[in-house]
């Protein structure tokens, strides 16, 4: 299993500003994932972050709005840029093993409220 | 497009009851299925992972079954406790490390 620490756990931000969320894993992992959970909804994948390459974004998510960094095998950041109230969600990072048969582990999430 | 549905959306039971949560998926071509629990405003805790070749997995009071051909999984919780109160999510893996999540079942166990 993997232990994932996410910071901040929650924040209230003004519209038009940006917030950077950090995700730290206790072991080296190849792939990290960022999800969004809007109020009352299930999880939606934002992007996949591989170390040493550009993040791969899912349909409906763009790099200008959600830039991602992956400087090493234990750390990633997600920035929510130029925020609006519609960005109020829980943002979660996740890690998995390299093959498709392994378990996914999640951080405790960042609860973002945009006012 | 894979769709994952969980029934019921919400469930309230008295402490001690055995209960079943359901997860249905539209495309049976999955690699595995994972059950999670989520406490309010928090992240996800992995409960059980079932590979497509398996029929069930057990962990303590939890038992998850998988019927891939019919597109169904169930999570059985024995002797429920107030501490089991949370939202339970299932997720199917449909491609290279892509998870599709269900809509969730919100469980409340009353003392």
Image (cartoon, rainbow, N blue to C red):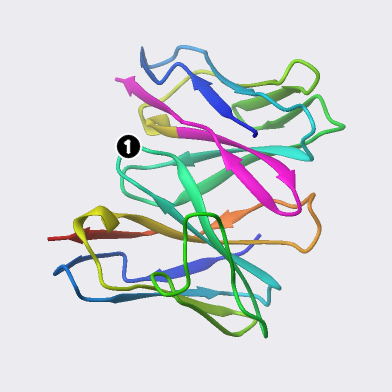
Judge left or right: residue A31 versus residue A114.
Answer: right
Mark 1 nearby-residue class (10 Å; few <14, some 14–19, many ≥20): few
Judge left or right: residue A114 versus residue B75.
Answer: left
Tell me the chain of label 1.
A
Q: Note whether A3 is above or below B92 in the view shown.
A: below
Number of labelled discs? 1
Q: Note whether B36 is above or below B55 in the view shown.
A: below
Helix, strand or loop: magenta stretch:
strand
In terms of depth relative to the viewer, which is nearer, A104 or B103? B103
Q: In the image, is residue A3 part of the stretch drawn in magenta?
A: no
Q: Note whether B69 is above or below A20 in the view shown.
A: above
Q: Secondary structure at mark 1?
A: loop
- For the point 37% across and 42% down, the residue is B39
Task: Give percent across and percent down for residue A86.
Answer: 25, 53
Q: Is residue B12 visible?
A: yes
Say which quadrant the N terminus of chain B sits in: top right
Q: Note whether B83 is above or below A74 in the view shown.
A: above
Task: Give percent across and percent down for residue B38.
Answer: 43, 42
- For the point 81% across and 24% down, the residue is B55
Q: Residue furthest right?
A: B53
- The residue under label 1 is A40
Residue span colored magenta: B88-111
Judge left or right: residue A94 versus residue B92.
Answer: left
């Amino acid at each position: 299993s993997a232990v994932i620490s996410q910071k901040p756990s929650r924040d209230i931000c003004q519209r038009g500003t940006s917030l950077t969320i950090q995700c730290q894993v206790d072991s080296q992992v190849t792939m990290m994932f960022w999800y969004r959970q809007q109020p009352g909804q299930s999880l939606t994948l934002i992007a996949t972050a591989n170390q040493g390459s550009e993040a791969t974004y899912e349909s409906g998510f763009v790099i200008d709005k959600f830039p991602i960094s992956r400087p090493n095998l234990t750390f990633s950041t997600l920035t929510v840029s130029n925020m609006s109230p519609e960005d109020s969600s829980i943002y979660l990072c996740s890690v998995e093993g390299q093959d498709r048969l392994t378990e996914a582990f999640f951080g405790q999430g960042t609860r973002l409220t945009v006012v | 497009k894979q769709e994952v549905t969980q029934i019921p959306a919400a469930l309230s039971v008295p402490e001690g009851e055995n209960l079943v949560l359901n997860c249905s998926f539209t495309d049976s071509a999955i690699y595995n299925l994972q059950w999670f629990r989520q406490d309010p405003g928090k992240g996800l805790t992995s409960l059980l992972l079932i590979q497509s070749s398996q029929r069930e997995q057990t962990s303590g009071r939890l038992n998850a079954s998988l019927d891939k051909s019919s597109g169904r999984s169930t999570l059985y919780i024995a002797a429920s406790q107030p501490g089991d109160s949370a939202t339970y999510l299932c997720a199917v893996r449909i491609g290279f490390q892509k998870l599709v999540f269900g809509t969730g079942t919100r469980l409340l166990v009353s003392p």
